[in-house]
Image: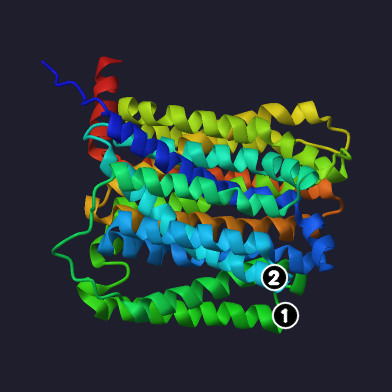
Amino acid sequence: MPTETPRLDRAARIGLAAMGVAVLVIANDFTALSVAIPAIESTFHARVATAQWVINGYALVFGVAIVTGGRLADMFGRRRVFFVGCALFAAFSLLGGLAPSVGVLLAARAIMGVGGAMMWPAIMGMTYALLPKGKEGLAGGLILGAAGFGNAVGPLIGGALTDSIGWRWIFFLNLPIAIFAILVTWRVVGDDAPTAVDRRLDVPGVAALSVGLLALLLALDLGTDDGWTSPRILSLFALFAVAFAAFVAIERRAGEHALVPHDVLENRAFFAACISVLMMSAIFFAALMYLPQFMMKALDHSAVRAGAGLLPMMGVFAATSFAAGPLYIKLGPKRIVCAGALFLAVGMFLLSFLSASSPYVSLVPGMAILGVGVGLFYSSITTAAVMALDSSRASLAGGIVYMFQVGGGSIGLGLNTAIVATSASLEAGIRSAFRVDAALAIGGLAVAALFVGGSVDLERLRNLRHHHRAHA
């Protein structure tokens, strides 16, 4: 008789709820301030280019520090690193809410990015550890579902707070949520610090990777304004190349102390999952960037209305992420990841038919299909990547996957912006860019089909073909 999958006990359910709340507050902070930028400009008499770094700085530091956060969580214990990250996030949220100047606000946001980069991989590691064997597929759905919900409600919460009691309360709201997550985690998650692990951190590797990623992400962020051949952008790309080469050389000599150990670098299934994420992330980030622009500039929507206009995509993304966990358990990684990639390609292709006369309702089917794809793909590819490595690497794996997501999104945005900027109109540029994104999705689908969840057995396929011919 088949053995039944173990049920979740009460402590595990409460712990998972705390993890979901913690992810929600991190994800909410990526989008909640997007509608508060004009109010921040007015408060500090700042230029929009400066105020925009309230969002960009947080995302940039988060993307640069997340691999280091994952390695620290695996080395020192996910629970401990989560507490440190959560404390940083809460303390500097308070400072951000009380900030007397835009400089203090930007510094607070940067440290919040460090806190978030420690929390996210620690949350992933603790979530997988809380689930019994056989239910690990639920972890990706829970984390990405909570993230999708946080991203979706962020502009709505941010807009409501900004219009009523002020943008500073977006920061103050983080405090009770962070305290709740810390208290629940303290009660239900045991100390998971490894006892037989060498805790010497690969500081040269951390420095080389951080400098390289910072240079790359800055170049991709500033290139559309400065021009891709400007001396500053070329210097940043050169710095990235030098730092990355130094990182590879350092990691080869570091052995077991490496920031990214050899068993991670040499894992083919994990690397394939990361490449697939890299290719797919251009799609999601491009949709988040250009659909609101189309709504505001072509359909004359307000910023808040444009944010709400993304709900068919973001709401479906969140709902599908929660459903993706049980589907992952039933269907396995390859089928669910490939299905998500296919939905992403189809959704982006449908959206590529927009024109200046397209009403909002014509965007909804494409956004909904895209939301299904995002929900199925990201939650399942994250689980497939984490499960490809030893459980002791869970937090590091989650950090690396997210780094590829941020990197792919930045590269994709640079490519999309270059296409849109050189087109005759916004609508024509979006059409061309979205079709390129759909082609990238097909490439990501091919990588997932061949390598994620195990390689395709070519010998078996040949035998099946010969078998069908014989019957014919």
* Disc ID at residue 75: none
Residue drawn at x 74%, y 35% is 309
Residue 455 found in image quarter: top left
Instruction: Using residue 94 as the reference point, say whether residue 22 is left or right of it.
Output: left
Image location of residue 103, percent across then percent down: 69, 73
Residue drawn at x 75%, y 74% is 226
Query: Mark 2 is on which residue type?
Result: Gly
Q: Judging from the image, what secondary structure is the residue with disc 2 in?
A: helix
Residue at mark 2 to residue at mark 1: CA–CA distance: 8 Å
Image location of residue 158, percent across then percent down: 70, 45
Cβ atoms at labels 2 and 1 below 8 Å apart = yes
* Disc ID at residue 230: 1
- Badge 2 local density, few (<14 within 10 Å), some, or many (20+)? many
5 shown above or below 429: above
Residue 261 found in image quarter: bottom left
Query: Mark 1 is on which residue type?
Result: Ser
Q: Is residue 443 visible?
A: no
Instruction: Using residue 95 as the reference point, say whether residue 183 is left or right of it.
Output: left
Image location of residue 262, percent across then percent down: 25, 66
Which residue position holds label 2?
Answer: 223
| Viewer-closest of 56 and 173 | 173
Image location of residue 157, percent across then percent down: 68, 41
